[in-house]
Image (cartoon, rainbow, N blue to C red):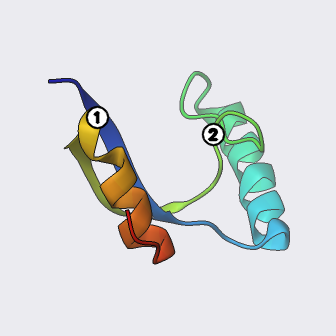
Amino acid sequence: MSRIAVDVVLLPSDEVAARAIEANRELLKQCPGKIVLDKDNCLPHISLAMGYIDQCRIVDAECAIYGKTG
């Protein structure tokens, strides 16, 4: 059975994300090659939980998140 990664995160407002991306750019001047934040590939976020789910349970997870019934 295939498993997929699942992360639960908080995304900041656009203003806060832009400030975090700018701060990251400054940090990268001192520490190149580290995590590069941007709006397309690596959004600034706060991780709340990380884990995995069996691929066949994706619909169940969506239902739990969005309050729908399967």
Tell me the quarter of the picture where residue 35 sits.
top right
Dividing the image into 4 quarters, which one contains the C terminus? bottom left
Residue 47 visible = no
Q: Nearer the viewer, residue 57 or 4?
A: 57
The residue sitting at 43% across, 59% down in the picture is 62
Tell me the quarter of the picture where residue 61 sits.
bottom left
Tell me the quarter of the picture where residue 29 sits.
top right
Outermost residue toward the front in this view: 70
Dividing the image into 4 quarters, which one contains the N terminus? top left
The residue sitting at 28% across, 34% down in the picture is 55
* Image coordinates for residue 5, horizontal then vertical, percent: 32, 38
Answer above or below: position of 30 versus 20: above
Answer above or below: position of 17 versus 35: below
Label 1 SS: helix
Q: Amino acid at mark 2?
A: Cys
Q: Nearer the viewer, residue 66 or 70?
A: 70
* Image coordinates for residue 53, horizontal then vertical, percent: 23, 44
Q: Amino acid at mark 1?
A: Gln
Q: Nearer the viewer, residue 58 or 46?
A: 58
Answer above or below: position of 22 versus 31: below
* Image coordinates for residue 3, horizontal then vertical, percent: 23, 30
Residue that mark 1 sits on: 55
Nearer mark to the viewer, of 2 and 1:
1
Answer above or below: position of 21 versus 37: below
The residue sitting at 66% across, 44% down in the picture is 27
Residue that mark 2 sits on: 42
